[in-house]
Image (tube, rainbow, N blue to C red):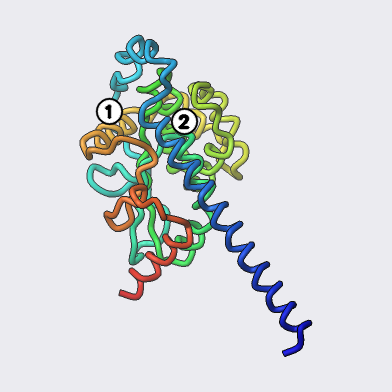
Amino acid sequence: MSDKNHQEKRTARQRLAAEREKQKAAEKRRRTLIVSATVVCVLGLAAVVGVLAANAGRSEQSSAGPVVAPSGAQGKDSLAIPVGKDGAASTLTVWEDFRCPACQAFEKTYRPVLKELTDSGRLRIQYHLVRLIDGNLGGTGSLRAANAAACAQDAGKFPAYHDVLFENQPRETDDAYADNDRLIELAGKVDGLNTPAFAQCVRNGTHDSWVDKVHEAFGAGGFSGTPTVLLNGKNLMEDPDMTPQKLKQMVEAAGKG
């Protein structure tokens, strides 16, 4: 082998090694983002300890009215909003809060592979919408956003509106989603969603008591933070090496089994 060819191959190997290290570093940053943000979603912010006590009764108070599950809700007590096809070999159970920055980080990181797997029929997602941040920091943005998402489910527009809420998520300490007008405005980003029926559902808090029931189930399940993500019962957030590619491999393996 000529010195020139040897040098070219060595350079190619070096470039490949450098690219692999770059990819590893990027994955580590994404996992760190999710893990560090989850701490916030579990505990709230230390600076607002006084606020927690002041708002505890108000933010955790059950919403008045009957429990009205959104159209197509499934599972025990109809607490889950399904995305994906019936009969998928794997089920991903997701507990999320629209005010939670770790939930936003999870969605941004995993959304492409989740869409690929649900569109292909290999994965079905069961979304559970909770109001953890309302309890931690006070306010009602988690509840109001979850109710609006349930209203979007009634209209057959849940996946798109779910993504819009995370894409436009305010700072965790900014209770912007407590404003129904803001939630209705964001519905304009989803084709065909911003209708009088949707607006009425949002303003009336049609699914508020349902959201409270989902939140109660979250606590009863022994979960402490959002996002909580279970693949066929296995808690993925407990795996420090979890990546979108690894999740895809697990789903594909389950399909072959």
Residue in the image at 53% along x and 37% along y: 165
The amino acid beneath tag 2 is: Arg
- 3 left or right of 223 in image: right
Residue 170 sits above or below residue 20 on the image: above
Residue at the limit of the structure toward the right, as seen here: 4
Mark 2 or 1, closer to the camera: 2
Residue in the image at 25% along x and 33% along y: 219
| Residue at mark 2 | 99
Q: Secondary structure at mark 1?
A: loop
| Residue at mark 1 | 66
Residue 229 sits above or below residue 53 on the image: below
In terms of image quadrants, where is residue 118? bottom left
Indicate which disc, 2 or 1, sits on the residue closer to the N terminus. 1
| Foreground of the two, 183 or 247 | 247
Q: Which mark is residue 33?
A: none
The amino acid beneath tag 1 is: Pro
